[in-house]
Image (cartoon, rainbow, N blue to C red):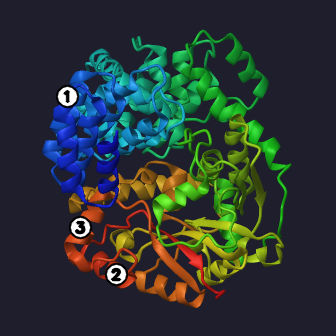
Amino acid sequence: MKKSKEAGELLSQGQFERSIIIYEEIARVYPQLLEAHNNLGVALRASGRVTEAIKSYRRAIRIDQKYLIARKNLTRALWEVGKIDEALENYNLMLNGSDPDSQLILEAVLNINSIKFSKPSGIARRLLLLLFTFKDIDHQRLAYPAIKLIEIGRRFEKTLAFSKKDNSGKPRFIKLIADDLSDQLLTNILTWTIIPSVCFEEWAVLARHELLFSLNRGDPINIDVEKLWALTLQFQLTEFVQEITSQELVLATKLKDSMDFDDEKALAIVAMYIPLNEINSDVCFWEKLYKSSKSEGRLKISVEREVFNREIENTIKKEITSLTPIEDTVSELVKNQYESNPYPRWLTVESTKAKQTFTTKIRNEVQNFSQFNLNLENPDILIAGCGTGRHALSTASRYLGSKVMAIDLSRASIAFAIRQTESYDLVNLNFHQADILKLGGLKKRFDVVEVSGVLHHMEKPLLGWEILRGLMKSNGLMRVGLYSVLAREKWSNLRTSTPKNISNAEIQSFIREARIKMIKQAKIAGDQSLFDIADFFSVSGCRDFLFHEKEVQFTIKEIKSCLEQLKLKFLGFVNLSETTKVNFYKEFGKKGNILDLNQWERFEEEFPATFITMYQFWCQDISQP
């Protein structure tokens, strides 16, 4: 239709009001034309008339309930005006089909993750349960909204209150724990995420204690075995970071030594305190139990994760190719940390079958890059400091034609990465052990280098950055992630390195005891921000977060200086929240320039939590004319 084409061209040129007039005319003449109402909604929303846009989208949906484009647009507009429940309900409707759009799933995950729930929401609960049924998403993103909904529903309140009473109603206690574990959303996050909640942690420590002593007394434990193993999986995922008394450890060890291994409930309770390979180091024993178990699955999940996967990783470690020696003192310290505590110990990852090129991705993130001399349709990508491989897998699976080389200091981390990625059958992803400081002799050059969360763990970050910069093709692109001084300032007094020459078990005890003090101090101070960080709730995460062997933090002024020295052009921060973008333009108005690091420096001073995870930004080589 000629008029529709004209309106579309006007819309693309930013002439929204003229576009709206034409779309309104088309909608009047053809009231049953779905596209007319949807396109009118798009134009209205672009012009800032979001409420009118919502009405237009709804007209399209009334004509055809299955008109997905309009429902997607409606959902995004509803989100924009704060009609969250209605937006969530639309996600429920769109994702309940037989083959939901993968990008829509990821959008729903990101949006529900951003909600700070203050009241119960059955709609949100249904969406969270639905999202847990999808494979190729990062389920950890669902942990925070899920546990907040559960806590708002006062799931743990009765049990915690009961524990403070002077009574001997132990059977009642077990009944309360059973009631709490009956929540399907809770068992999902117990199984598939690390739960970021001190309230939950207090409940879990209490529940574990009561289960252990009930088992010792021979009391009936009327809790479904699958629910017990869900709780066990959480303790294993967090590497037993929670408070444990010496009395509990002695009793758990005694029960381990006298246990009937056919009693899966007893085994689940003891495994809340002791790793499976310490309960029995014989892999053949676990293979036999795995095959004979009547359990529906969570015992088997535990055996897979804690026994079989560890054996696989030990085999993989011996086969990893080393590209460089590791001789630097700090590199050796950092390597040893991650050999003991690979980080992060992820279970699920955002992964999509390659549907776009890297060119499409970079164009969506930055607008002022040059493609000269680069092959961004089939890029060679270096991921320096890949850790346990989550980001490397996501990158390799997402971009058509990409070839990804991932390196790390730690063989344990790489073994975890290789084992996790094997099921994805990727031919374009290779892992190697290497030290960035020794990579200068590498002959290969890359279109893209990604180094996130690595440079700030080096003695001289600029030296490591310079070496990686030398591995880029002329005009190459680089994505960098660095810690912010301002964002991490509130935790600076908590950070320290672990004592020297102590065993892994001693490191675990050191971190566990330090956390107990931190939790008490945070409660006294009334600052709960520490508890919003998922890394605080596991041994490997907490060690990386607060007890790293080496951490250097940056200011935006220092980043600007580094970029100038390395002849790199700043292309913009990525992963900025919508709130940050809105506040930035409120602060600077029409003069706001997201590529101006001086403006970002002033902005961060006013909003110091902006880069609470990291500065994440793209930059590009400008050394050649």
Looking at the rendered structure, the kind of residue marked 2 is Glu
Looking at the rendered structure, the kind of residue marked 3 is Asn
Spot occupied by residue 428 in the image (x, y as percentages of width and height)? 75, 48
Give neighbour class at mark 1: few <14, some 14-19, many 20+ (Cα, 10 Å).
Answer: some
Spot occupied by residue 553 in the image (x, y as percentages of width and height)? 47, 77
Give neighbour class at mark 2: few <14, some 14-19, many 20+ (Cα, 10 Å).
Answer: some
Q: CA distance from mark 1 to mark 3?
A: 39 Å
N-terminal of the pair, mark 2 or mark 1, is 1
Residue 80, above or below 294:
below
Q: Which residue occupies the foreground of this view, 175 or 147?
A: 147
**Does residue 163 show up?**
no
Q: CA distance from mark 2 to mark 1?
A: 51 Å
Looking at the rendered structure, the kind of residue marked 1 is Pro
* Residue on which the image places disc 3: 583
* Residue on which the image places disc 1: 31
Q: How many marks?
A: 3
Task: Mark 2 vs mark 3: give the one in front.
Answer: 3
Q: Are marks 2 and 3 in contact (CB under 8 Å)?
A: no
Give neighbour class at mark 3: few <14, some 14-19, many 20+ (Cα, 10 Å).
Answer: some
Left or right of 252 on screen, residue 555: left
Q: Are marks 1 and 3 in contact (CB under 8 Å)?
A: no
Q: Which residue occupies the foreground of this view, 542 or 202?
A: 542
Q: Identify which residue is drawn at 82% across, 69% down.
A: 324
Which label number is shown at residue 587? none
Quadrant assignment, res 523: bottom left
Q: Identify which residue is drawn at 73% across, 37% down.
A: 425
N-terminal of the pair, mark 2 or mark 3, is 3
**Does residue 570 show up?**
yes
* Residue on which the image places disc 2: 601
